Each structure stands twice: as structure tokens, then as C-alpha cells.
């Protein structure tokens, strides 16, 4: 076996694991995210405690369906990204009061937004 093959097979690839702590406000503004990390939605304590989610001025192109798991959210800020549409799961956010989507090239907004009775700012 050549030294190159031996070295390649023994290399360990490090992967960045994101761990989120429970907090009322999860602020990821201006962090160059290209996607909302799925790990954000895997910890029930994080999901239940979160009332504000901020991803303004990133490079997001979509919002994951898992956003619908965050039923205690009051404020979402996805302004100034590259998002074209919202998932239908957004209609599960019955406590949502403010949804900031400015600066995105939306094609359309889902009709489900009309079901959010507490939504005051769009």
C-alpha cells in the first residue's frame, strides 16, 4: 500500500456539530448562513423555549418545514435573504405576532398566513 493511500484511509474528517442551547431569542443575524441548521429543531427544549427567531441578512434560500414545530414563536425575522416562498407549515405558528420578510424576492405568500389570528406585522 502506498503512503498516500495509507494516509488517506487513516485521516479523520472533522464535522462541525451545531449545538443550540434553549433560549427565548435565537439570533443568527448577519452570520452568512445558507440554510437554517436542522439541528435547531432537534432539541425539544430549544423548540419549546424559543419565542424569537432571527436570521436577517444571511443567504437563506428557503425556510424548512420544521419551522412549524416552533409553536411558541412570536417573532420571526427572515429579512434580507434570498427566500422565494414559505412552507405551508408556517400555519402551525398560532402565536406568531410579527413576521419580517422584507428584502426577499418572494413569488407569493401562502394563504395559510391568513389563519394566523395573532399576526399583526407582516
Image (spheres, rainbow, N blue to C red):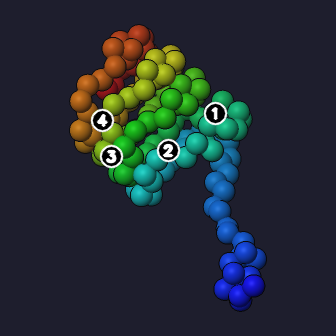
2 vs 78, nearest the viewer: 2
Task: Point out the tag, 2 or 1, that comes first from the N-terminus.
Answer: 2
Residue at left offset 67%, top offset 69%: 13
Return the residue at label 2.
36
Q: Name the residue under label 4.
A: 84
- Find the residue positioned furthest to the front: 1
- Closer to the eye: label 2 or 1: 2
Query: Pointer 1: what residue?
Result: 47
Q: Distance between the residues labelled 3 and 2?
A: 12 Å
Q: Where is residue 37 in the image (x, y as percent from the top left)?
A: 55, 46
Q: In the displayed image of the protein, which residue is found farthest to the bottom?
A: 3
Q: In this view, does 97 lie to the left or right of 122?
A: right
Q: Which of marks 1 and 3 is in front?
A: 3
Rendered residue at 42%/26% (across/down): 87
Where residue 84 sits in the image (x, y, percent)? 30, 35
Picture coordinates of residue 93, whole percent (x, y): 50, 21
Q: In this view of the protein, can residue 37 be seen by the observer?
A: yes
- Of residue 70 and residue 13, the one placed in the foreground of this image is 13
Residue 81 numbered tag: 3
Q: Is residue 32 above or below residue 80?
A: below
User: For mark 3, does the 10 Å Cα neighbourhood hold few (<14), some (14 to 19), or many (20 or more) residues?
Assistant: many
Q: Where residue 41 sits in the image (x, y, percent)?
A: 62, 37
Q: Is mark 1 on a helix, strand or loop?
A: helix
Estimate the spatial distance between the alpha carbons at disc 1 and disc 3, rounded to whole Å: 22 Å
24 up-or-down from 33: above or below: above
Quadrant of the frame with the C terminus = top left
4 to 73, vertically: above or below: below
Q: Nearer the viewer's eye, disc 1 or disc 4? A: 4
Rounded to the nearest angstrom, the CA distance separating label 1 from label 4 is: 24 Å
Mark before the other along the chain sequence, 4 or 2: 2
Amino acid at each position: 500500500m502506498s503512503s498516500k493511500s495509507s494516509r488517506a484511509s487513516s485521516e479523520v474528517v472533522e464535522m462541525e456539530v451545531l449545538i443550540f442551547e434553549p433560549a427565548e431569542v435565537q439570533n443568527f443575524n448577519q452570520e452568512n448562513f445558507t440554510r437554517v441548521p436542522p439541528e435547531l429543531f432537534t432539541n425539544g427544549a430549544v423548540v419549546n423555549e424559543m419565542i424569537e427567531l432571527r436570521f436577517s441578512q444571511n443567504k437563506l434560500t428557503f425556510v424548512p418545514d420544521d419551522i412549524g414545530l416552533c409553536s411558541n414563536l412570536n417573532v420571526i425575522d427572515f429579512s434580507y435573504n434570498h427566500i422565494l416562498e414559505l412552507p405551508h407549515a408556517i400555519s402551525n405558528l398560532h402565536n406568531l405576532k410579527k413576521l419580517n420578510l422584507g428584502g426577499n424576492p418572494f413569488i407569493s405568500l401562502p394563504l395559510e398566513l391568513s389563519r394566523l389570528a395573532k399576526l399583526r406585522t407582516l
